[in-house]
Amino acid sequence: MNNYFSIQDIDSLPGWVEEAIAIKKNPLSNKTLGKDKTIGLLFFNPSLRTRLSTQKAALNLGMNVMVMNFTGEGWSLEYGDGTIMDQGNSEHVKEAAQVVSQYCDILGVRAFAKLEDRDDDYSEKVLNGFINHASIPVINMESATRHPLQALTDAITITEYKKTDKPKVVLSWAPHPKALPQAVANSFVEMMQRMDADFVITHPVGFELASQITKQVPIDYNQENALKDADFVYVKNWSAYQEYGKVINDDPSWKITNKKMKLTNDAKLMHCLPVRRNVVVDDVVLDSNNSIVIEQANNRTYAAQLVLKKILEKS
Ligand code: AN0
Ligand code: CP
């Protein structure tokens, strides 16, 4: 594997999940694989889990880690081909990506959707700019439209906690005061189409994700109906895809409450975090034994470690 851009880069999902669970049991089993190799992590946005779990994964493999907050600390980058750079941007991604490739063996990039121009975000200008111009493998640490490290984590977590071969998994939209990207939801939807799951998406009218991603996945506009007999409830806000980047509705009645969890088959509650308490999910649910959000965050390390291991083994 050269780059980890989306979950399409996973060749065999059951094999990967099995290997990640084996890494979790013995995280230091490959502690010299990355010896004298360096990973560079570039952040254009905030992060707690991705930043620390990817560093932890690299350290478990014996790698050196360099982290840079790009926004405010790096030069503002230009991505356009042939641009006359007489405006605000100081450096082109062509040089930036090649320069980082001189210092590092693997590069991770986090660059969220700007939620201003759909075509611009869905072209994955930033991540593709780095992939196209770097001479080292690039890992997506949440790009404009995908969060594949999170989705791999979610597959591991569901595999660990499922009680039946084909659990019912519900992805539920929830209210949020700010417009959020579709990346987490997009990658989760793609992952659930590859897993053995009875999968349904529920959201208010107008929050349909891109149809090229959701394909044949059933959408139920009635949240309570969708939650019936669920084994896993994955709650996440995203902004509209059609009315791009808009919060067209922040209806508080979509919050996950204890009453709603009672409709489920004693479901596990999942969220990628960070989560706004009592807006997205009630305290009582997040603090219950049904919540596995912390276990999910723990698995971020093993998902990242598996991706790094695959890349190191190839290079
Ligand atoms: C981001 C998002 O929804 O994409 C990151 C989640 C991992 N969330 C927020 O900005 C709150
Ligand atoms: N879930 C996730 O990616 O969290 P961070 O934004 O804190 O990295």
Image: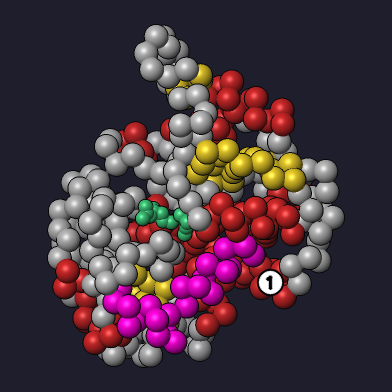
Front residue (pair 127, 192)? 127
Looking at the rendered structure, the number of numbered marks drawn on it comes to: 1
Is residue 21 rendered magenta in the image?
no
> Would you call the spot at circle 1 few (<14 residues within 10 Å), some (14-19), or many (20 or more)?
some
Q: Position of residue 141 (x, y in %)?
A: 52, 49
The answer to whether 277 appears left or right of 96 in the picture is left
Q: Which residue is mark 1?
A: 24
Taking depth in this image into account, of 253 and 171 the one nearest to the observer is 253
Instruction: Kindly identify the residue that appears in the image at 17 percent across and 61 percent down.
Output: 250
Judge whether residue 294 is colored magenta: yes
Could you tell me which quadrant the C terminus lies in?
A: top right
Residue 7 percent coordinates (x, y): 53, 55
State the scheme by which the image is colored: secondary structure
Residue at left offset 59%, top offset 55%: 52
Instruction: Give the residue type that dot 1 points to.
Output: Lys
Q: Main secondary structure of the magenta part?
A: helix
The answer to whether residue 73 is above or below residue 66 is above
Residue 298 figure quarter: bottom right
Residue 289 occupies which quadrant of the picture?
bottom left
Q: Is residue 126 visible?
A: no
Left or right for 171, reference 303: left
Look at the numbered disc 1 and say if its residue's Cβ is closer than 8 Å to ligand 2: no
At 68% across and 58% down in the image, what residue appears? Answer: 57
Q: Residue at x 46, y 31 (%)?
A: 72
Q: Which residues are magenta?
A: 281-302
- Quarter of the view holding residue 61: bottom right
Relative to 131, is 156 above or below? below
